[in-house]
């Protein structure tokens, strides 16, 4: 199984410290899907998205951009996601990836009226209040046709979506850990929120978030479509 990881971050202080975002995503999911080969593709940089048929699955990372921004790489990525849908490629999106998938597949994502959300928030996942790290103000505001909400929070009703084709996405960041969440606030908090909101966000970083958050679900998602024959075996 060969999975492309689309890195949608141009580069910032966090990537200087932790390495490319695509590699960060791989470090989270690879231990839970050892049979897969992961190929980081820097779509916000010099790399073109992987063609349908060239990979068995695609993961779309977060980004400093919104779906409403105009960049040289955004429209080619939109076209590529639609082509992968048509091909039947399983797709998994994180934060910006979640928003872009919704926007491409008939829903809507936009800047919400709440303050920038950082630190951790609790999400209803199958009836359990599960903490997860977040870093966003944009969110999905209209559910795409055929999609089902599978995680939610009062401030973010469409926190995870499962589609009626091979696609799954989450607003939160399962690849983050506590140190990364702290560093994000240290490096960018003053630009994104006032001092009181920043300290409130910092107070939520308590170590409760599982290092394996949502990894089993994503691994099972890709395995299910491999077993069903919707992706080719490597």
Image (cartoon, rainbow, N blue to C red):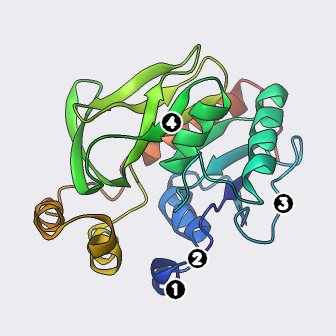
Mark 4 and mark 3 in contact? Answer it, CB < 8 Å. Answer: no
Judge the density around disc 3: few (<14), some (14-19), many (≥20) Cα neighbours within 10 Å.
Answer: some
Which quadrant of the figure has residue 171? Answer: top left
Residue at horizontal 15 percent and vertical 61 percent from the top: 197
Q: Which residue is mark 1?
A: 16
Residue 11: numbered disc: 2
Tag 2 secondary structure: loop
In three-dimensional space, the C-alpha distance between marks 4 and 2, rounded to whole angstroms, equals 23 Å
Q: CA distance from mark 4 to mark 3?
A: 24 Å
Dot in front, 4 or 1: 4
Residue lying at 67% horizontally and 33% vertically, measured from the top left: 104
First-in-chain label (2 vs 1): 2
Judge left or right: residue 223 versus residue 156: right
**Residue 219, x across and y down, in percent:** 54, 43
**Residue 183 position by quadrant:** bottom left
Task: Name the foreground residue: 71 vs 165.
Answer: 71
| Foreground residue among 221 and 92 | 92
Residue hosting label 3: 48
Disc on the earlier residue, 4 or 2: 2
Residues at marks 4 and 2 touching, judged by CB atoms closer than 8 Å? no
Whether pointer 2 and pointer 1 mark residues with C-beta atoms closer than 8 Å, the reply is yes
Label 3 to label 2: alpha-carbon separation:
17 Å
The residue at 57%/46% (across/down) is: 97
In the picture, residue 89 is in which quadrant? top right
Q: How many marks?
A: 4
Helix, strand or loop under label 3? loop
| Lateral position of residue 170 relative to residue 123, left or right | right
> Disc 4 marks which residue?
109
Mark 4 residue crowding within 10 angstroms, few (<14) / some (14–19) / many (20+): many
Query: Mark 1 touching mark 3, by CB under 8 A?
Result: no
């Amino acid at each position: 199984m060969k999975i492309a990881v689309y890195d949608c971050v141009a580069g910032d202080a966090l990537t200087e410290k932790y390495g490319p975002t695509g590699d960060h995503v791989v470090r989270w999911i690879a231990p839970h899907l050892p049979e897969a080969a992961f190929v980081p593709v820097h779509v916000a940089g010099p790399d073109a998205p992987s063609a349908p048929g060239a990979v068995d699955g695609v993961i779309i990372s977060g980004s400093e951009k919104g779906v409403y921004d105009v960049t040289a790489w955004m429209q080619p990525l939109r076209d590529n996601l639609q082509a992968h849908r048509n091909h039947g490629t399983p797709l998994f999106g994180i934060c910006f990836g979640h928003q872009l998938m919704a926007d491409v597949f008939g829903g809507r994502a936009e800047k919400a009226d709440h303050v920038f959300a950082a630190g951790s928030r609790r999400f209803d996942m199958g009836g359990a209040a599960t903490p997860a790290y977040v870093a966003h103000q944009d969110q999905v505001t209209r559910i795409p046709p055929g999609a089902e909400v599978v995680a939610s929070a009062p401030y973010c009703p469409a926190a995870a979506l499962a589609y009626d084709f091979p696609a799954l996405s989450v607003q939160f960041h399962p690849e983050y850990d506590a140190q990364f969440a702290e560093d994000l606030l240290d490096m960018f908090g003053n630009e994104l929120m006032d001092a009181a909101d920043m300290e409130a966000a910092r107070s939520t970083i308590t170590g409760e978030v599982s290092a394996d958050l949502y990894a089993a679900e994503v691994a099972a998602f890709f395995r299910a479509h491999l077993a069903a024959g919707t992706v080719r075996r490597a």
